[in-house]
Structures are given as C-alpha cells and as structure tokens.
Image (cartoon, rainbow, N blue to C red):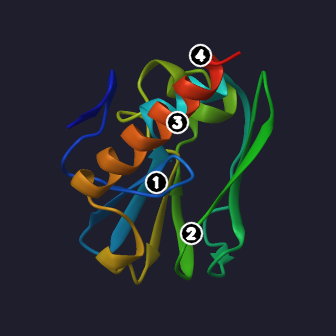
Amino acid sequence: MKAFEFEFPDNLYYMKNHIWLKPENESVSIGITELGQSLSKGIVHIDLPEVGESINKGDMIVAYETIKAVSQISLPFDAKVILVNEKLWEDPDLINGDPYGEWIVKVQGKFIPGLAMEVKEATEYYTELITKERGRYADN
C-alpha cells in the first residue's frame, strides 16, 4: 500500500516513529520505513547493539545519525538481540537505497500484533501526517 509516493509493504507492521517490524517465527526484523528514510535525508552513521544484548521495552536499541538529526529506535516489547546487519557498520547508506531490503537488527521477543500498526492503519496514519505537513509548509 502507499501513502502518497511512499511504499508500505503489506507483510510488515509499523510504528509511528517510522520503524517497520517483520515477525518471523521466533524473531522480529526491524528497519526504517521508506518515509522515515526520506525524512531523515540520508543515514550517515549507525550504532548497532551487541548480539546477545537484552533490551527492555521502551529502551533504545539502535541510534542512527542523519544529516539532519540523531534518532533512536526503541521497541514496544522486551527483546534480546540475535543478529545485527554487520554491513551497516561500514555502509549505513545501504538503508537509504533499500529501506525494506536492509533490516537493521533482528531480535527475539514477544511481539504482539496490537503493539504496532498493520499496513492499512499505517498508510492511513502516514497519509494524514503527510497531508498535515504538506499543508503546513504550503501556508508558508
């Protein structure tokens, strides 16, 4: 599905902070949405957690730096890091080119679908958000 020109694949869950989640068996892959990457204007540095690290619900799991700001990713559930995308240490720009193909980290944790938005809800939320932002800038 799309929110304006931004793609939101049907097989993912979404957070309001521009993060996508993909539950797979006992793990959850985590990445940044196409819209989030676009708003960031390019990821230039990323701090990844250590494999085996335990992350409490709401705590930061990943920090990334863009040309505009430093942002953090946190999760709505307790998790244990089982894999990190090692390629991102050397080339965080990979996310900029393929935000859905390049996951950042994989965790083991109790993901409950109600903790994140399904694609229909996410595209409605982001369409409204984009509409408000474009309207705000059109008035200037």
Which residue position is annotated with label 1? 30
Q: Which residue is at a point 49% across and 41% down the rendered structure image?
A: 129
Instruction: Decide which of tag 2 and tag 4 comes sooner along the chain.
Output: 2
Instruction: Decide which of tag 4 and tag 1 comes sooner along the chain.
Output: 1
Q: Is residue 71 left or right of residue 120?
A: right
**Quadrant location of residue 44?**
top right
Q: Residues within 10 Å of mark 3 (few under 14, many from 20)?
A: few
Which residue position is annotated with label 3? 132
Say which of marks 2 and 4 sits in front: 4
Q: Is residue 98 above or below residue 103?
A: above
Secondary structure at numbered mark 2: loop
Asked whether disc 2 touches disc 1, contact meaning CB atoms under 8 Å apart, the reply is yes
Q: Is residue 22 left or right of residue 32?
A: left
Which residue position is annotated with label 2? 75
Which amino acid type is marked by label 2?
Leu
- x, y percentage for residue 120? 22, 53
Q: Is residue 36 left or right of residue 112?
A: right
Q: Residues within 10 Å of mark 2 (few under 14, many from 20)?
A: many
Q: Quadrant of the C terminus?
A: top right
Q: Which residue is at a point 39% across and 67% down the rendered structure image?
A: 116
Which amino acid type is marked by label 1?
Ile
Which amino acid type is marked by label 3?
Lys
- On the question of residue 113 being in view, the answer is yes
Which amino acid type is marked by label 4?
Ala
Instruction: Decide which of tag 2 and tag 1 comes sooner along the chain.
Output: 1
- x, y percentage for residue 22? 32, 57
